Image (tube, grey):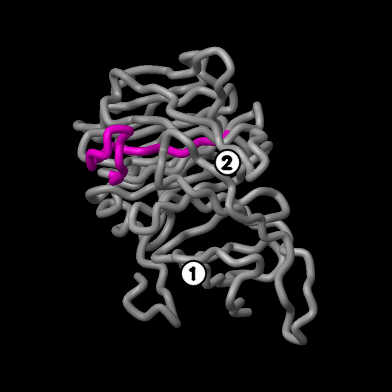
Amino acid sequence: DLANAEAPVVVGREKLAEAFSGIPNKVDLFRGYAYVATVGIGLQVVDVKTAKNHTGEADGSAIVGIFDSIGQGYGQPHDIVVYKEGKAILTTSAGYLILLDTTIAQVPQHIDAFRPLGYSATRVGVATEFGYTDAGGTAQVMDLAVTSGTLGKINTVDVTDPYAVHVLGTAKDDQGNEVTTIASDIKVSKTTGLAFVTTYNAIQVFDVKDPFNPRLLNTIAQLPDATGALVPIGYVPAIAEQNGWVFMANQSQGMRVLDLDPSLIEVNPKYIYL
């Protein structure tokens, strides 16, 4: 319970795997269900209300659904985003972008396993109803995914119609070269038109206002310490973003916050809160 952010309280629990049988990884919440990408098992769907009743030992009864990406030959689950009513994306270790119908949360249904030649997806961020201007100057919207995979590319993908997914573009730097990045987390902001990517040693900012031509704006590999001296950012496995504020789960220093001005991404971040 985060009603008091300074003193969060554990109000429930669930056992997602027996000892050494699985490793819960990424999680997304939607309409009372937690969708958990559990390595060794698959995508697990947990009824949060039932899990809240488990104040003692959890017994697995709150797990109400599963999608077996491993048994279906798509590999271990890596990332999960439920991005609209009845629509979800699961990425896997084999590089598949799996589109799921989650209209019935207890029975996630496979729509498509997207992995065309030259494309791979292990991490994904999604912005629904993302606004952009097409080549004719007309305002349009789409459900936009930004992905990273084993090939090291950052791609923009149109997932508006999960039955007709297609790659839009590949991110490039200011020299026109394709950016090589292995991401551990991705967040897309439709209010700023930016995608924030955490790698194993940096935060990267991409301009996706034109989703057909994504471009790298900045790579932040160092941050000031308490004395103002620049030090390596370290490993940040997960991030959250809101209106240019990037909340980083830093492996060695806990939660840190970057203030990135959406209107002008600077060479160095404006503020770092330790």
The answer to if 147 sits in the magenta stretch is yes
Q: Nearer the viewer, residue 92 or 68?
A: 92
Which residue is pictured at 31% across the width and 19% down the height?
164
Label 1 sits on residue: 261
Kind of residue at badge 1: Asp
Kind of residue at badge 2: Ile
Give the alpha-carbon distance from disc 1 to disc 2, as whole Å: 36 Å
Q: Is residue 80 above or below residue 255?
A: above
Residue positioned most to the front: 136
Label 2 sits on residue: 23
* Residue 152 image-quadrant placement: top right
Q: Position of residue 186 (x, y in %)?
A: 51, 47
Q: Position of residue 58 (x, y in %)?
A: 41, 51
Disc 2 element: strand
Q: Nearer the viewer, residue 251 or 179?
A: 179
Q: Nearer the viewer, residue 150 or 58?
A: 150
Quadrant housing the N terminus: bottom left
Checking the image for residue 100, the label placed there is none
Q: Give the magenta range.
A: 130-148
Q: Position of residue 148 (x, y in %)?
A: 56, 35
Which residue is pictured at 31% across the width and 59% down the height?
52
